[in-house]
Amino acid sequence: MELTIDIITWMRRFLVPGIIVVLSVLSLALLFIVIFSKESDTESEFTQKYPLLSKRLSIENQNDILINFAPLRQDLKDYLNSINIPHSFYFEYLPSGVNIQDGEDNQLVGASLLKVPLVMNLYKAAELGKVDLDEVQTVTEILPDPENIFANQLNLKKGDKMTLRKAAEYTMSHSDNTTADLIYRRIKGLLPPQEEALNNLDIESKTELEQNTELVYISSKSYSSILRCLYLSCFLEPKNSQEIISYLTKSIHREYLASGLPKDTAAANKIGTFSDQTISDCGIVYVPSRPYLTCLMLFTKTEGSATHFNAISSIIYKYIKEANTSN
């Protein structure tokens, strides 16, 4: 009888609490698995839905891939010094924010590069309910282009109709002046200055009036803030940032930075030219797990300019693709 009581007492003191502890641990482990599974599912769903945006938007405390950029920094500076052309250059490794700059104080005419914030303003107006992206607009003016690069590449005629969404696509993929003008006319005055893209980002620019034309000067670093904002979806909803970037990946102007990439590598780029004075190309390159942003602006526009964009792009891609992940 006393032995039975001792066993019962022992079970109450030690065995039962032990079982409770074990069950508690198992419950916590199960809870962790469920939460982790949900987070993984959420990340996977986000990546599938918005493959061109930063994964930072779907998960917290993401571990960045760290790469030693000293060799790349030196290679880029050596090349840029060798061409002896005034320039503005900016590179950023998007997972970590590590960047390389050269000639960063130089500002060039933004020209067609500024069509990106124009389209961002259109989508912001749509988010605020001030315009419908699927609203049909009529082409009322065909804009010329002295350089014959961005002028009516779609062979539009006065009276042609298209939605604002389609106009945005052509403005990004073809850098078409006529579709950009259609967007500008529709949204002019819809957003107060403080709600426009250029006034919401880390951008230093200056505006000058030349021959009755307002010119915006901007550096490669400042312009990169626009592309980074799309990538991080800091100004627009993710679905809209994704849509704009997807249009940029369809750019027909692949003769500059994109020419230094393998054909199967996605790049969302935008070019800009101003007379025979400047040529620029800036974009996001989607190397798997190693996306980066690069922007090169040259104070010249000659037949050999494309060679420099190709060389810079090739140097960066090769390094990013082949570098190991050790610190």
Image: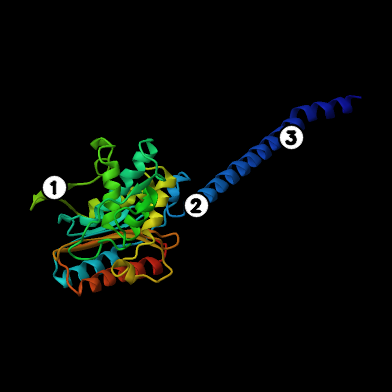
Q: Which mark is residue 207?
A: 1
- What is the x, y in percent for residue 56? 43, 47
**Could you say where residue 86 lies in the image, as x and y percent from the top left?**
13, 64
* Residue 107 drawn above or below residue 153: above
Residue 19, numbered circle: 3
Identify residue type, mark 3. Ile
Q: Earlier in the sequence, mark 2 or mark 3?
A: 3
| 221 on left or right of 95 | left
Of residue 105 and residue 191, the one placed in the foreground of this image is 191
Residue type at the position of mark 1: Thr
Mark pair 2, 3: CA separation: 42 Å
Q: Residue at x 36, y 52 (%)?
A: 161
| Residue at left offset 33%, top offset 51% | 228
- 303 up-or-down from 188: above or below: below
| Residue designated by label 2 | 47
Q: Earlier in the sequence, mark 3 or mark 1?
A: 3
Task: Report the front residue among 200 and 3.
Answer: 200
Image-quadrant location for residue 293: bottom left
What SS does tag 3 mark? Answer: helix
- Helix, strand or loop for disc 1: strand
Query: Could you say which is closer to the camera, residue 209 or residue 178?
Result: 178
Dot 1 crowding, Cα within 10 Å, few <14, some 14–19, many 20+: few
Q: CA distance from mark 1 to mark 2?
A: 39 Å
Whether residue 96 is visible to the viewer of this picture, yes or no, is no
Q: Residue at x 62, y 42 (%)?
A: 34
Three-letter amino acid code at the position of disc 2? Thr
> Is there any visible trace of residue 243 in the rendered image?
yes
